[in-house]
Amino acid sequence: MSEVRKFRLTCIVCPLGCTVEVTMEGDRITGVKGFTCPRGEEYAIQEIREPKRVVMSVVKVKGGTFPTVAVKSDRPVPKELIPKIMRELAEVEVEAPVRVGQVIVENVLGTGANIVATRAA
Amino acid sequence: MRSEYDVVVIGGGPAGLAAAIKAKELGMSVLLIENREFLGGIPMQCVHPGFGLHYFKEDLTGTEFIHRILERFREMNVEYYTNAHVLEIVPYSYRHKILRVVTEEGLFEVRAKTVIYAAGARERHMFEIGITGHRVAGIYTAGEAQTMMDIYGVMPGREIVIVGSGDVGLIMARRFTLEGAHVKAVIELMPYPGGLTRNVVQCLEDFGIPLYLSHAVTRVEGKKRVERVIVTKVDENLRPIPGTEESIECDTVVLAAGLVPYLKVIEKAGVEIDPATNGPVVNSYLETSVPGIFVAGNALVINDLVDYVVEQGEEAAEGAYEFVKNGGLPALKWRKLVKGRNIRLAVPHYLADTKDVTIYARVAEPEENVKLRFPEIGKEIRLPLVRPSEMIRVKLKGEEIARAKGRITMEVVRDE
């Protein structure tokens, strides 16, 4: 019998902020309770296995309306990679015009996520 | 440019843009006036998500949300000025107002049948929250810091203390950390965080940022720039407890201590103010006590969600349309909305049975398993949870309002 561990999480999917409890035996998730919607259950399992977040920032832009353009990852990326992604983005400079949705960095750090513009410049 | 418009909209943020789009769709002549150098308002500097879940049914960043609104605004070809300030609104007759406006091209006057005031809110500054000490460099409001960092690409500091744990303070804590600054603490006066639990989790706990509850920054010290803040515990009456002072070294203090509707111009025009919202007293059409002046967005009431702000903009445009069409609003009888048990604020203040209305309200105290009740019209809604930080939004139909003879009470009661 492997050790039984319980994790209490606050779901961050929506403003309700449900408290979800995940039970694990060894590496196996054996129970999830406290969620009030399927997205909450999915979040809790993901959060235990590999926490992910959407990362957002600004990058430098040449010749635009503002000196920066706002960007985000088009899907959640592993949480532990976020500082590395931020350092990479600090080196990026793009040229205007930039449109919303334009890919700024493709497949950032091999995560499969693209960094896309969220403001026009 | 014409000399008279059906509606002049003041403010080019989400409420003003939504009002202008709707007014134009309804066939009115519209002029929009914005005092910043660009349209879009505060969402232009909000690179984080959480915008548009109700309105667009998608989770967008502030910048993406406002981009969609701006695209519609441009398609509608609304006349507008940026870098323009409204100095004064003169309500010289029931049906006409004169606006005095300064632009880069000089001073001009414009006549308007109606005005939609959507100038948003201002941030509370250190003088309002009891911070004493030195007035040195390195003290910013959250909005100032955000504009510097996320529009102009300048870091406001390295070692940061944030005052206020509302969603704005929490989101700024994460933003600074991601950009490589060290957020030393978030200081909250109340015994509980001001923002949503999910934001405490993903903005503070994710990064190990300490949250000081029941604490106040009482003093800022430094010679040329902030060098440290003095943080003091507060008692249950929110008064600093002597002897509990603690010093935190930092080079920057960011104030995220709440918003106040920015009303300077319409206050001068004579609108009545509600001390509970700090915004104007309005009726179902979002018209203020000065006929033909409407208000929407954070200038009306401090909102949680941009979706509600946009909704209010559209509502005000519909009100202005009714006013222009009928030479005044069609309602004859107004029922006062009275705040009952555990209701701290509610808008609109006067309801008409001529239309459906959306009420925005906040409770005074958090409570679980409650009912929201309108006893005079026999309406009840069950709510699992109410919190002061989360706005209640509820619709009443014209025929429901008609059931009440005089006042309509709104109250939160225990669901037994």
Image: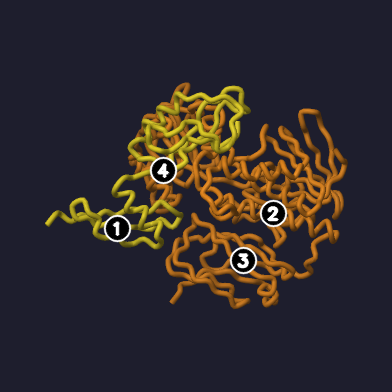
Chain colours: A yellow, B orange
Separation of disc 3 and disc 2 at Cα?
15 Å
Q: Chain of mark 4?
A: A
Separation of disc 4 and disc 3 at Cα?
36 Å
At label 1, the amino acid type is: Glu
Q: Nearer the viewer, residue B70 or B93?
A: B70
At label 4, the amino acid type is: Pro
Task: State the SS at label 4.
Answer: loop
At label 2, the amino acid type is: Glu
- Which image quadrant is residue B106 in? top right
Separation of disc 1 and disc 2 at Cα?
42 Å
Residue at label 4? A76
Label 2: how many Cα within 10 Å (few below 14, some 14–19, many 20+): many
Residue at label 3? B395
Separation of disc 4 and disc 1 at Cα?
22 Å
Quick one: quadrant of the N terminus of chain A? bottom left
Q: Is residue B403 left or right of residue A62?
A: right
> Pointer 4 and pointer 3: residues touching (CB < 8 Å)?
no
Residue at label 2? B314
Residue at label 1? A21
At label 3, the amino acid type is: Lys
Of labels 4 and 1, earlier in sequence is 1
Residue B218 visible to an observer of this rendering? no
Of labels 3 and 2, earlier in sequence is 2
Circles 4 and 3 on the same subunit = no
Q: Chain of mark 3?
A: B
Q: Is residue A93 above or below residue A7?
A: above
Circles 1 and 3 on the same subunit = no
